[in-house]
Image: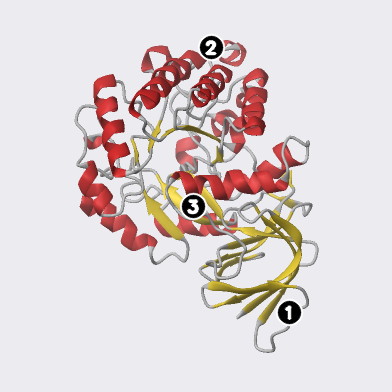
Amino acid sequence: MILLKGGRVVDPVTKRDEILDVLIDGKTIREIGNDISIDDAEVIDCTGLCVAPGLVDAHVHFRDPGFTYKEDIETGARAAARGGVTTVICMANTKPPVDNVETLKYIQEKGEKTGIHVMQTATVTKGIKGVELTDMEELEKEGACGFTDDGIPIMDEKLLTEAMERAKALGLPISLHEEDPLFVHQAGVNCGIVSEKLGYGGAERYAEDVMVARDVVLAERTGASVCIQHISSANSVDYVRLAKSHGADVHAEATPHHFTLTEEAVLEYGTLARMNPPLRTEVDRQSIIEGIKDGTIDMIVTDHAPHSDEEKSKPLAEAPSGITGLETSLALGIKSLVKPGHITLMKLIELMSTNPARFYRMMPGSIAEGEVADIVIFGEDDEWVVDSFASKASNSPFKGWTLPGKVHCTICDGQIVYRGGE
């Protein structure tokens, strides 16, 4: 048994925010109260710390199979645990992609050995080519938790409409990467002042806007549960807000890098700030924050995208897009959203745990008696320096930053999977 003593329990499901003891027995929470004492329990002093449901990162790339020099399922899971994440939703653009049951089962079986919950999406189209739909019914039967061609937009409206209809019939969500290639002159950098300084073509915000506008309408028409992935444009936030007001089952993700940084970061961090969709302007960043505040954006995810040092050392036009994010996401949420007073800590946990779980049809974690003990323990004000990673990769513009929100311990299924200093 594990006894968490005197922590501030912050739970969006029960709306509880108070100092309590939490007793874990096996995989579940046995008791919550004051002055709990058990002789044979391991006691973790949580005085001054927050005790919250384990985070659910609904957008990660573990690169396995096919790109395991960047990351694999084991190292990705360790990075997740270090960041307080107890459940991850893996994207399907592996090699081979998860468009077949064999690859799906390979990931599921490896994920079961990691100590955290590794859930896997399947692709919408075969080979992520946007031409032919996968056997969505078979993939759902074998445990795929949703569908996405993340990394590649689906350009064929007829095909996407059918995919939405089939996903709705299966009761599963569909998540969409929104970048029209017509408006992407060079990927990874916003088309604007910074790209002009660099003599780099860049990606226009309209690449995202035109796709989001189309797809929220298709979502309304089909009734499908649709997520706009890693939203980056002020216009797109407005389109999602409008679609929600019409009753569409539309959701949106935001990443910590999109609500923390702007395109100017490319001048300072180079390829470490190259990502798809790119960092955009301060107006876009503020619009994302407003979308988070008013519920238009209802999930915070990392889009954890590890790459090797060799790859990120290439010139801007040749380097791959993406950053690691699992180990800094909670801290950046606290720094950029909670500390400035945009949202409460309770709201942050809702965005990073409760809402992603619900979108992917899981019971959200809760600090309540009888619930599974998936828990993160962190110090909201405890500062730490981003100087090492459990991930294989370290491609982050936040290296060297001092951040609040140090994770002290992560518990999954009642087992300690990360303890500070490990």
Callout 2: few (<14), some (14-19), or many (20+) C-alpha neighbours within 10 Å?
few
Examine the image and state in which quarter residue 109 appears.
bottom left
- On the image, the x and y values in percent for residue 249 come to 44, 32
Q: Label 1 belongs to which residue?
A: 36
The amino acid on which the numbered mark 1 sits, given as a three-letter code, is Ile
| Cα–Cα gap, marks 3 and 1 | 40 Å
Q: Name the residue under label 3.
A: 392
Q: Quadrant of residue 173?
A: top left
**Residue at disc 3, secondary structure:** loop
| 197 relative position to 363: left or right | right
Label 2 sits on what residue type?
A: Gly
Foreground tag (3 vs 1): 1
- Give the amino acid type for the residue marked by disc 3 in the picture: Lys
Quick one: 75 or 345, which is closer to the camera? 345
List the residue tagged with mark 2: 199
Residue at 65%, 88% (x, y): give it: 40
Among numbered discs 2 and 3, the one appearing first in the sequence: 2
Where is 9 relative to 127, above or below? Answer: below
Q: Contact, CB < 8 Å: mark 3 with mark 1?
A: no
Q: How crowded is mark 3: few (under 14 residues within 10 Å), some or many (20 or more)?
A: many
Dot 2 or dot 1, earlier in sequence: 1
Q: Nearer the viewer, mark 2 or mark 1?
A: 1
